[in-house]
Each structure stands twice: as structure tokens, then as C-alpha cells.
Image (cartoon, rainbow, N blue to C red):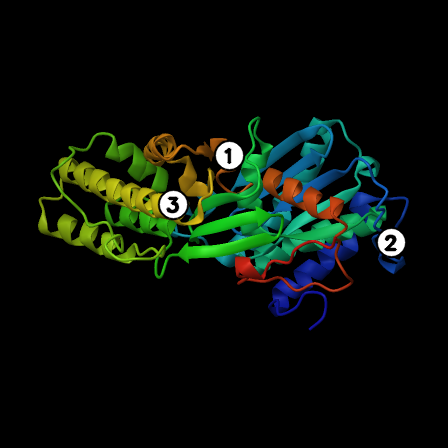
Amino acid sequence: MGYFGTAAGPLRILLSHIVLHLAVVFDNNNRNFLLTNGARVDNQHRQWRVLGIESSCDETGVAVYDSAQGLMAEALFSQVSLHAEYGGVVPELASRDHVRKLIPLIDEVLTKAAVSKSMLSGVAYTAGPGLLGALLVGAAVGRSLAWSLGIPSVAVHHMEGHLLAPMLEANPPRYPFLALLVSGGHTMLIEVSGLGQYQVLGESVDDAVGEAFDKTAKLLGLGYPGGAALERLARSGSAGRFEFPRPMTDRPGLDFSFSGLKTRALTTWRDGERDDSLRADIALAFQQAVVDTLVIKCRRALQQTGLRSLVIAGGVGANQALRQQMQQLAAEQGCSVHYPRPEFCTDNGAMIAYAGCQRLMAGECDGPGFTGRARWPLDQVSRPPG
């Protein structure tokens, strides 16, 4: 299928131009880098300084992580305003905006970190899951930059980045731990035994929790993206006016379902007076049902696995009601709970730089070929060599 896999014709041409022109953009003294031998892994590195690139959906993220100094700099450009008028992400627009923003963001982050390109020892990029065109933009830039510098590049699973994001905090979790991954595309309970050692214990059988938040917000007229707007609205709601179900909590297992909650919110809104009071009360009832469901499943998973450390990751992990009840659960169960800082709950380059650094330190790097993976089950992520 070639370097760009199944990318559509116009996008394939666009990405080919990116690769050809990066020789000049990144290294004017090495215009023939595409004809050289590519990346070399130096297993004698005692300190790794890695550039991370995130471009899986509608946010362009770049960061520099140093294995000795920690996170040196990061920058993010969100495409929310670009997609808002469409009520969701338009893949072609997302890909083209990554093309416009990625190289300026790399320059910005290197300047903030006071690091030159020659001081980098590796490049990490999100390889999936996500929008294929968007992934290929990040991969083309990341791999080309690494090739021009003669340093290794490494592909990172987007969800692995989220799982490891709390490692960037002052009090990081230790392996093994239980992770609740809650985002716009995923809802999973995962037993994390080490880097690349992930056992999915339960997941949503329909809508992801972030998707359910956004769809419910949209039907309430809150716009896109609506998760944060729904959370703000819920603070003014009256508790107890509506009682939504806690799906799949009355049966064994750790799977989730949220499509029924979305339907309940829709019928409650449709059958009511559709005023601001009703809107706020539905938002509160919906949010409380979601949070209770997540807490119940986490309690069950902690008890079943015996794990004493809980990680909450992904965009919904920034929800304050969820954090408050997870703190209560941790106190009740006698375990610790860990989160990324709110800005690292959503997609970002820092988590990719960190995850990529860990894999490079373990001796992993890219081979000569690459195909983006729009779908990539987490339990298919490889354990690093050694």
C-alpha cells in the first residue's frame, strides 16, 4: 500500500508534498535526507529528549519531554471553532488544519524549551486510533523530522498516551494500577501492569461516555462540543427532580452502556416545557447517572482485581463531579486516585512525548513502513522489547 497506506488521492498527494518539503523546512544543510539510511537507535542513550506530536482528531499538540528534566514545553491548537458550525469534526478540514498548524507549533515548542532540533534524540507521534488523514499528517511530519536528524521515531497508541498522562504529575501512579479511560471515543476499565501490558476488563457496548455527554448537550441546545457546557449547566440544576437509570449496574460484569441515558434525556426534554429550568435539571440528572455508573463499576473492578491505585484519564476525567466522587471512592476503598492536570485530560502532545520516550528508552523504534490505524484495539498494543 506504500508509505501512506489507504489515504485518499488528494490527501496522499498533500502528504507527499509535506514529506518532500520538510527536508528544507527542518534541515537546510541536509536536503538529501530522504535518500539516507533513516533513524538509528542508540541504546546507550542515558538521557532521552523526545518531541511528541498529537494529531489524531481535532487538536494539534506538540511537546518536548526529557527523561531527566521532565516536561520541558508543550503547545496545543484546538480546532473547536473550525468545526463548531458543523456540529462535529469534519475529517478533511481537520487534516488540512493540522498541515497548517503543526510545523509552526513545533517551532514554538522548541523555542519555549530552549532546545534546537539537533538536541532532540527521538520523535514520537500518534499512530492511531483516530481520523486516518489527521494521523497521517502527524506521522509524515514526525517521521520526516526524525529521518532528517538521523534519530529514531516511534509510533504511539493514542489511548496509551492518555493512560500514561498522570505520569507527568508530581505524584504519579505506580504499576500495576486500574485505569478508567473516559473520552469522546472510548469508555474502558483497564488493568495496567506495565508499559504495553494492558488488559481491558470492561468497555462500553454502545456510546462512549464523552460521546453521550456531547449528544445530550446537543439535544439540549448547548452547541458543540457540549460536554463542558453540560457540566456547567448541571451546577444550576435541582437535584431529585429526575432520576435517570444507572445502566448495567444491576448485573455482573464491568461493561458500560450510555445510549439509554441519552434517550431518557431526549424523551424528558421532548415531553417537558423546554425551558431553562428543565434544561438544567436534565443536565444534572444525566451527569449524576453517568458519574454514579462509573463509580459503581470502578468500585467493582477494584474489589475484583485487588488493585490499590486508580487512574482516571481522558477528556471526561476533567469533570469535577466525577473527580469528587472518585475521591470519595478512593477513601472508601483505601486506595489512591490519580488524574492528569485538566489540560492534559484532553488530547495533547505531552502525553505522546512521554509515552514515546518510555518506548524509545525500552529499545523500540519505527521500521521502514507505516500505515495509520483508524481502529487499533488497546489490547493489541505491543509490549516493548526487553
Q: Residues within 10 Å of mark 3 (few under 14, many from 20)?
A: few
Measured as percent of width and height from the top left, residue 166 is found at 54, 36
What numbered label is drawn on residue 33?
Answer: 2
Amino acid on which the number 3 mark rests in the picture: Gln
- Measured as percent of width and height from the top left, residue 120 is found at 79, 38
Q: Earlier in the sequence, mark 3 or mark 1?
A: 3
What residue is pinned by disc 1?
340
Q: Quadrant of residue 6?
A: bottom right
- Where is residue 217 drawn, in percent x and y? 29, 45
Compared with 307, 170 (above or below) is above
Residue 110 seen by the camera: yes
In the displayed structure, 251 sits above or below 176; it is: below
* In this view, the mark in front (3 or 2): 3
Q: Which residue: 82% across, 35% down?
A: 119
Q: Residue at x 43, y 52 (%)?
A: 188
The residue tagged 3 is 303
The answer to which of marks 2 and 1 sits earlier in the sequence is: 2
- Looking at this view, name the residue that lies furthest to the bottom: 1
Whether residue 131 is visible, yes or no, is no
Gap between marks 3 and 1, in whole Å? 24 Å
Residue 176 screen position, x and y as percent: 55, 43
Q: Is residue 384 left or right of residue 57?
A: right
Near mark 1 (Cα within 10 A), the count class, few <14, some 14-19 or many ≥20, is many
The amino acid sitting under disc 2 is Phe
Q: Which element is circle 3 on?
A: helix
